[in-house]
Image: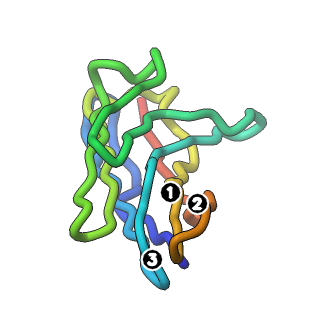
Amino acid sequence: VQLVETGGGLVQAGGSLRLSCTASGSIFSINNMGWYRQAPGKQRDVVAHITSGGSTNYADSVKGRFTISRDNAKNTVYLQMNSLKPEDTAVYYCTAEISEDYSDYSKYWGQGTQVTVSS
């Protein structure tokens, strides 16, 4: 199983970016999916989370600006980021809880994509 993220880059404050993350490999089903971020010298924190049924949760710092969504047919999770601020600068990682058969789910991580917001 592999998670591949795309969509990071450099943007000015107030701008927008859309991150995508697609899971591939031996996948029977995917449960929760989410996005984390890690700024230099800081711990990795959760940004947003979405269940298999579409329920979402957001970190307080991104509420009203970021939107998480998923396309179950494509095994893909998205993060639409609007009104970006310099403090959103970080490496963004996607996660997915994946079952490869009828057994338990395991949590997988993407390789990370850099988002840089200039002031």
Question: Which quadrant of the rendered structure holds the C terminus?
Answer: top left
Task: Tell me the crowding category of disc 3: few under 14, some 14 to 19, or many 20 or more residues within 10 angstroms, Cα based.
Answer: some
Identify which residue, 41 or 54, lies in the foreground: 54
Query: Which disc is residue 105 wearing?
Result: 2
Query: Which disc is residue 48 wearing?
Result: none
Q: Position of residue 53 (x, y in %)?
A: 28, 43
The relative height of residue 67 versus residue 29 in the rendered view (above or below) is above
Q: Which residue is mark 3?
A: 27
Identify which residue, 23 or 88, lies in the foreground: 23
Circle 1: residue type: Ala
Query: Which disc is residue 96 wearing?
Result: 1
Frontmost of labels 1 and 2 is 2
Task: Tell me the crowding category of disc 1: few under 14, some 14 to 19, or many 20 or more residues within 10 angstroms, Cα based.
Answer: many
Labels 1 & 3 near each other (Cβ < 8 A): no
Residue appearing at x 41%, y 67% in the figure:
29
Label 3 residue SS: loop
Label 1 residue SS: strand
Q: Position of residue 52 (x, y in %)?
A: 34, 48
Q: Locate residue 30: give its quadrant.
A: bottom left
Circle 2: residue type: Tyr
Marks 1 and 2 sit apart, C-alpha to C-alpha, by 9 Å
Identify which residue, 22 or 18, lies in the foreground: 22
Residue appearing at x 77%, y 36% in the figure:
41
The relative height of residue 66 versus residue 31 in the rendered view (above or below) is above
Report whether 40 appears left or right of 116. Answer: right
Report whether 83 appears left or right of 108. Answer: left
Whichever of labels 1 and 3 marks the residue nearer the N terminus, that label is 3
